[in-house]
Image (cartoon, grey):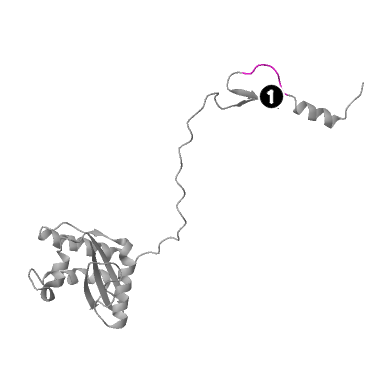
Amino acid sequence: MRTLPLGSALLLAACTVSTQPQPWGTTPEPYGGPRYAPPPYPTAPPAPTAAPAPWAPPAAADRFAAARQRCVDETNAYRARVGVPPVVARPDKAACTDTDARGDATNHTVHGGSGKCGLAAQNECPGWPGTGAGIVSQCLQSMFAEGPGEPYPQHGHYINMTGRDYRGLACGFYEADGKVWLIQNFFR
């Protein structure tokens, strides 16, 4: 009889498969324990999973977030006074509206960037002393006080604030040298 080295015997023992019948749903494992096999009948394919969202850097803190919300809330309060539906905040347009405000401040103009954000109408309080949050109420009150009435050149801010066709609003801010430029961009 031929003898095998000890390592070979272990290798053979590890590869031995039992030929005895196994319980349903299991298949023998080389180490002797059961491995659960899939059922013998077809199953539904797994539900598709959503692709992971693409990575985006975290948003920087918006120092004007409270002022933006206040601008939308107070605009809606004025709209409610005249029976006009509220507008929704358009945070997707805030950066563009801030750029309008910065451009007007830098160029010492009013409505200089108007139209670049896909807006339908624009109101502006240029170069008011104070802070973004501090001027919202005064700015909106002064614009609302222009109306009601026609023609547009004398009542335009009021007409924009209360326009029934407008559904969205982005409020943009720029502060420099203790002054604030506040812009309201209205969207259909």
Q: Is residue 174 visible?
A: no
Q: Residue furthest front?
A: 42
Q: Secondary structure at mark 1?
A: loop
Q: Is residue 106 left or right of residue 41?
A: left
Q: Position of residue 146 (x, y in %)?
A: 11, 72
Question: Which quadrant would the N terminus be assigned to in this image?
Answer: top right
Q: Position of residue 90 (x, y in %)?
A: 28, 61
Q: Residue at x 19, y 68 (%)?
A: 137
Q: Residue at x 13, y 69 (%)?
A: 158
Does the segment drawn in magenta span residue 18? yes
Residue linked to disc 1: 32
Type of amino acid under label 1 = Gly
Question: Which quadrant would the C terminus be assigned to in this image?
Answer: bottom left
Q: Residue 113: which quarter of the image?
A: bottom left
Q: Main secondary structure of the magenta part?
A: loop
Q: Is residue 43 left or right of residue 87?
A: right
Q: Residue furthest bottom?
A: 108
- Give 80 or 41, whichever is nearer the viewer: 41
Q: Residue 186: which quarter of the image?
A: bottom left
Q: Is residue 76 above or below residue 21?
A: below
Q: Position of residue 110 (x, y in %)?
A: 24, 79
- Give 175 or 120, whichever is nearer the viewer: 120
Q: Residue at x 18, y 57 (%)?
A: 86
Q: Is residue 57 left or right of residue 72?
A: right
Magenta part of the chain:
17-22
Does the segment drawn in magenta span residue 119? no
* Mark 1 neighbour class, 10 Å CA radius: few under 14, some 14 to 19, many 20 or more: few
Q: Residue 134: which quarter of the image?
A: bottom left
Q: Is residue 51 above or below residue 60?
A: above
Q: Position of residue 43 (x, y in %)?
A: 49, 29
Q: Is residue 77 visible?
A: yes
